[in-house]
Amino acid sequence: MKKIKLILLIIISSISVYAQKNSKTPKLGQTTNEELSMKFYEKDSTARALVLEEKGYIWVDRKNKYDFRTDIYKRVKIFDKSEIDLATIKVNLFGEEKIKFIKAITYNIEDGRTTEIHLLENKIYKKKLSEKWQQVSFTLPNIKEGSVIEYSYSLFSPYFKLDDWNLQANIPKLKSDIVAEIPGNYKYNLRLQAYKTLDRERSYVKRSCILYPGIGEGDCVVYEYGMDDIRAFIKEDFMLSPKNYLAKIIFEPVSFTNLKGVKKTYTQTWEDADKTLRTNFFDGQTSKASFFKKNLPSEILNIIDDKERATSIYNFLQERLVWNNNYWSQNKIRVKQVYQEKSGGVDGINLTLYNALKAANIESYLVALSTRENGTITKLFPSVTDFNYVLVNVIINNESYLLDATEKNLTFGEIPYRCLNGEGRVLDFEKESYWEEIIPKFKTSLRNRIKIQFNESNEAFADITRETKGYYAFNERRKLNSKSEEKYLEDFETKNPDLEVEKFEVISKKDQTVKTSYTVTLPEITTLQKTIRFSPFILDKYKENPFKYNQRHYPIDLGYEWSDSYTIFVSAPDGYQLLKIPLSKNFKIPYNGGEIIYKVQRSGENLKILMDIKLNRNKYNNTEYHNLKKFFQEIINLQDSFIEYSKE
Amino acid sequence: MITKIAGLPLLLFFINISISFAQDMSLMSLTLSPELTKDANAVIRESYTEITVEAVDEMIVKERRVTTVLNKLGNKHVDAYASYDNDTKITDLSATVYNSLGKEIKKYSKSKFTDVSAVDGGTLYSDSRVKYIDHTPTEYPYTVVFEKEYKTSSTGFIPKWYPLDSYYVSVQKSEYKIINLENIETRIKENNFDGYSIKRVNEDKIHYVAENLPAIEYEDSSISISEILPNLIVALNQFTLKGIKGSAKNWEEFGKWRFENLKNGNDILSESVKYAIQQKVKGAKSNIEKAKIVYDFMQNRTRYISVQEGIGGWKPIPADEVHKMGYGDCKGLTNYTKALLDAVDVKSHYSVVWAGSEKKNMIEGFSSMQGNHVILNIPNDGNDIWLECTSQTMPFGFLGDFTDDRDVLVITPEGGLIKRTPSYKNETNLQTCKASIQLNEKGSLEADVEITSKGVQYDDKYGIESLAKDDLEKYYKSKLWSYINNLEIKSSSLENDKDNIVFKEKLHVNVADYASITANELIVRVNVFNKNTFVPKRYRTRNHPLQINRGYKDVDEFTFTIPNGYKITSLPSKVEISTKFGNYTMEVKKVDEKTISYHKTLFIKEGIYPKEDYKLYRQFRKRIAKQESVRIALQKVLN
């Protein structure tokens, strides 16, 4: 497998001058007989559809209010019925964006002749999705296996932000090209993210490309990029957002000078970005401490110990505020309102937390980040629009904690899994802001102590104490808090159908460690037979290998490292002898990737089994995939092995 | 404060007062009886529906609903939304949220409702929209007073009355009233009223009140809730549907109206299309053969695209247009198929059905707008054939579990009639899995597997035919055989015999380290390829009867060739479990020194059983699950 070049960067700065008009994408009618009679794609015979050609042309249209106009042309071959949905095109439009000049043709070979059928204008539908979004949709007629569809349309946008050009999709492409003709008064950074290099790449100045009445002509910078034979993108399990890997060209706005010569500058350095974040994105809500000094309960503000005071504020707000499931919305934020109405998005809630902590004189910083599904931040290019989440970083007695008040079941210093996505920007409004890796403060672990015995009625039973920490504890807390005990146990027994719970106790769930204990019977293991065989891993047993494939293209990212440990005692039933026991074994993933220790100790007819499983890293290279697969296979085999007792 | 809650029912007012006396209080226990809070996430304190039929083409519906939400899971029962389209106008809409003390905390006027398109992803366009409130509750319990009023010309749909409408909701009071200003003849049907306190206020009028209906808790494998909830359905004998007038007092008349009004003119094909299809069926010996050719032609030519606008929600798009565009929704495609069959002189009827894996009938003896899907019926001299026209891949005459075994409305030129679709019961849903398995001394195995599926098991399977190669691999590795670790698919081929409705999978696979090796044994789980370890959830107390929705039978026949250096010693004894829910047999036999055979049958019978039987059923499945994991030990031959 070829190694993937993750991100190739191109920086092209533009030159400020002025421009002229007219330039388009190809006209419909490019379909050839070869394409129509094509049965499969040579380079990927499993492909069920193929983009034959795709072209985008971005320019400023004088005849349309000088809006940005993007002409789109696309030609797609459909090999298989299962890709018929490609013939239905839906374009979402934001605010004042518009779509015009939709044209589409389906080509087929019918009874040996090439036929074409055009999309009718009255079959183009437009609907309002929500206040800000509209959708225009159409479907091409007469689609069959072997059809070639061809369509083009133009998008008009008064907005400065240009959409990314996606070179890669979940079907392969023969050819994808983008041309951007940018008048000199606009400035963008263009960035390529791809697994291979471009096949076409050119930039030049086009004189007099645009005319501003009464002002004169302007020049443009023209960027032309193209790539051929782009493979289909296939999503894999345990990967970071596909957005990080899909090949595309990104337009990052830098500045805009209007006709009066007033220049609006977008982010250029991270220092600019920090400022933009503070003023625009946090909406000036970073200094509202006085409100909280007045409104937070004084008994909390009066706590002397810093850690205790911070924890109390955190718990108080976590309890009080309800997250409305929105992330950083870029809408107006008013922390007073959030506090009073008791609900808000991630931004509102964690800004409230930040201000409240400030009010309590706790050293606090906002941390801007991007969640796992939102893609990682490219540090090389200052941008504020990639952030979609904010946490609070507090420093108490030189100890650093990350806080998030949106989730009820987190404890002080724990953050949601969605935040584990590389580095975040710690915003220090007085000194200098900096990057820091977002890592969980507490280790995730599971610890089971299981004691298996036999009672007078010939049945096996077990006493179990189960301790979880970190993300395991978070999940456990969530289950325990959202359900009645009866429901919790019903779910527990459904997951472990061989166990029936007799006694259950929650020893602790408020601290970082969640501790529960169970007394269970194992009705399937009885001394009614001469031979008793069973696996002593009666709980939290690995049954399925999460890694099932032979190939891996992208790195594995688990988010956090974890460890499991089991201590199992088995007391022999009366009159039985231990006949078979599993063998002790150790296993390691190279480069400190992980470890299994499995130890079996016999004392008379009784048995003690110790098992420690550790995954020491949260990231593994795609070349390490097989080691991980083997690692889980070992766990499964060891936990599946059984012990056998026999009566003379 | 008091004026603010003036519009609230007295009860909330009472809460308000009691609060000022007791600061710490379990509010709900003061005001809501334990019967209402048991198993409830929300309580409908008051629900009032008033339908005024102003004329045959004008109806005003007023609704007021006061819901107390007890916890997070109850939020969805507030149901503060209103649907509308070109034919339905919302005239009044508001929602007010009160905290547990009866204090108003938020008010949503009509303009504060979020307005979105009410269309799922599968529909290209529809004019139906919905307005709802986007409210994040910050404390529980809270109460929402929701009021709406809308006006529509479609009197074909009189809102039904479901005083209880889902699990985990109880009802304090629910009232339903119809004011029939022009005294249009009306029919009603009361369903499942028994055991509930529901009163008809006035025998001459349609006016009902239900009080103190306790919440119903969900349990797995129960009878569908829609079959047990009390409800009232109402239909007018004279009505309007999206501008089209109708009159019917029974299915016959209703069918006739629908035949004449909802498709007239739309099943005409151009002469050239007729000629083309007539040419295609030339030489066909019977109507069935003709119908097969037509169905195949339709399947290859079309795909499912849904556009619902105005009457288009009820009337098929013209057959000629479907032919030209190559797409349509269920109505359009069914009507097109019918038109093609007409062209070759095969009689067929457009038929309305409630589709879904849960079987639901068109109500016999009560005609009204019902159903959510259409299929095509070919009378075929009393040996009816049914066609699902929205699928490009379904075999001719096969319905699968989407529309099988239920009453449907068949629309003929003479009128409507109720007919039952064929069912796929018990043993009909058969899967046979045969495998010849070679074990080697390292514990790995190599096998040829052949799986044959029929009936609904065919229905569950045939979709894999359209999977891409890597998705097919994923299907075997992560779904069907996810429990087999180290599985490698060496080759696979699928055979879809549409004529006999049999799906066959042939695979060559190997599994490294399948058996575990100890010092002198090779331990092998014998059910390699069809392990069924399903155990129903344990309920400490089971409240509802058990329903096994669909029966099936699985037969597994494997032969194992054991590796050199090992011998067969003891094998598990034969297992036979026979219960009213079905049977299970498992037998492992030594064929010769090197060969073992495994034979298993699992038969599950559909049916409804008393709640006491749930435990027995769980026991049955548990015993099966245990047998499905049985292992055998092969002894090492010591030299």
Image (cartoon, coloured by chain):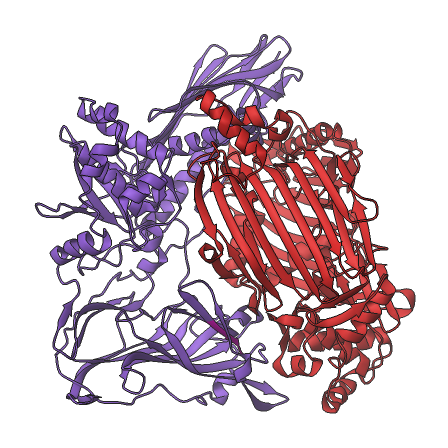
Q: Is residue B499 left or right of residue B37?
A: right
Q: Is residue B612 left or right of residue A311?
A: right
Magenta-span inclusion, residue A138: yes
> What shade does chain A have?
purple
Magenta-span inclusion, residue A62: no
Pinpoint residue B364: horizontal percent, then vertical percent. Answer: 84, 55
* Corner quadrant of residue A109: bottom right
Q: Nearer the viewer, residue A620 or B381?
A: B381
Quarter in which the C terminus of chain B is drawn = top right
A574 is higher (above) or lower (below) than B519: above
Pinpoint residue B253: horizontal percent, then vertical percent. Answer: 86, 66
Where are the magenta residues, as a range? Answer: A136-140
- The residue located at (46%, 28%) in the rendering is A480
Pinpoint residue A77: horizontal percent, then vertical percent. Answer: 49, 78
Which chain corresponds to the colour red? B
Q: Is residue B419 left or right of residue A286?
A: right
- Residue closest to the far front: B3
